[in-house]
Image: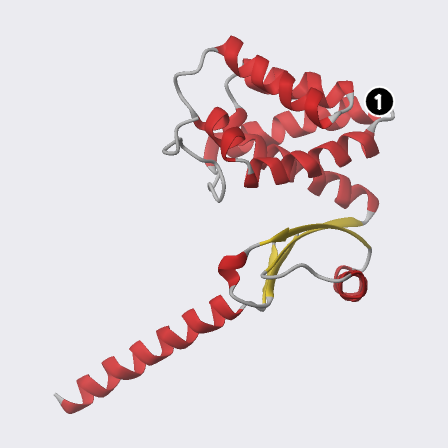
Amino acid sequence: MPQSAPTTENQVIAGDAAILARRYAGALYELADEQKQLDAVASDLRALRILNQESAEFQYVAGHPRLTRKQLVEAAQAVAKGAGFNPLTGNFLALIAQNRRLNVIGAVIDAFLNELAKRRGEYTADVRSAKPLSASQQEQLATKLREIAGGKVHISMREDASLLGGMTVKLGSRLIDASIKTKLARLERQLKTQTMTSQKGAA
């Protein structure tokens, strides 16, 4: 696949696209609830979210404007089969592809999991760490996040060397940032502000 393919990670979904994503998520939720497959579908979507964030190939397919509907559906079916998704999840992913809406799949996943969390009092935490966490560290983190959220927390772990050290945790709409990268950026901003202030004072 070309390296210059468009990507979907960190894409901000708003307006009509956000409304559409919530509608898709709502429809999937109702089907999963009706078929008593909520847990299976939620597990699939957590795995799909990581794929959407980390797989350059998936991002290429999701963001490429010239792929045919047939190509998109075949790609979606291949992903579902390879990941061993529940049939409901697989069919839904194929529908999203058929409608050329893979570019909003991240927002659909978030909306579905947020609705599940809201109804069950459960939460999902997206954790990025510069280095892998040990089992003990993961358990300590899980305990702390449960205290913050006030309910059960599903943790999605990813390594991100760009953080330099520490980690970032997205818990619902809340971002808990304890990364060295962010601290350095904050320090840089402070130094720039101080320098500008000093220059103005000397003028």
Q: Residue furthest left?
A: 203
Picture coordinates of residue 115 (x, y %)? 72, 39
59 vs 93, nearest the viewer: 59
Q: Residue furthest top?
A: 70
Picture coordinates of residue 161 (x, y %)? 53, 58
Picture coordinates of residue 111 (x, y %)? 65, 37
Residue under the image location 70 percent in, 20 percent down: 81
Characterize the local packing of mark 1: few (<14), some (14-19) or many (20 or more) Cα atoms within 10 angstroms: few
In the drawing, does residue 74 fall left or right of residue 103? right
Q: Quadrant of the N terminus?
A: top left
148 vs 20, nearest the viewer: 148
Residue under the image location 48 percent in, 36 percent down: 8
> Does 15 sit above or below residue 128?
above
> Does 52 sit above or below residue 183?
above
- What amino acid is labelled 1 in the image? Glu
Q: Residue furthest right?
A: 36
13 vs 106, nearest the viewer: 106
Residue under the image location 82 percent in, 27 percent down: 33
Colouring chosen for the image of the structure: secondary structure
Q: Quadrant of the C terminus?
A: bottom left
In the drawing, does residue 152 fall left or right of residue 171? right
- Asked which secondary structure carries label 1, the reply is helix
**The image quarter in which residue 3 lies:** top left
Q: Which residue is mark 1?
A: 34
181 vs 40, nearest the viewer: 181
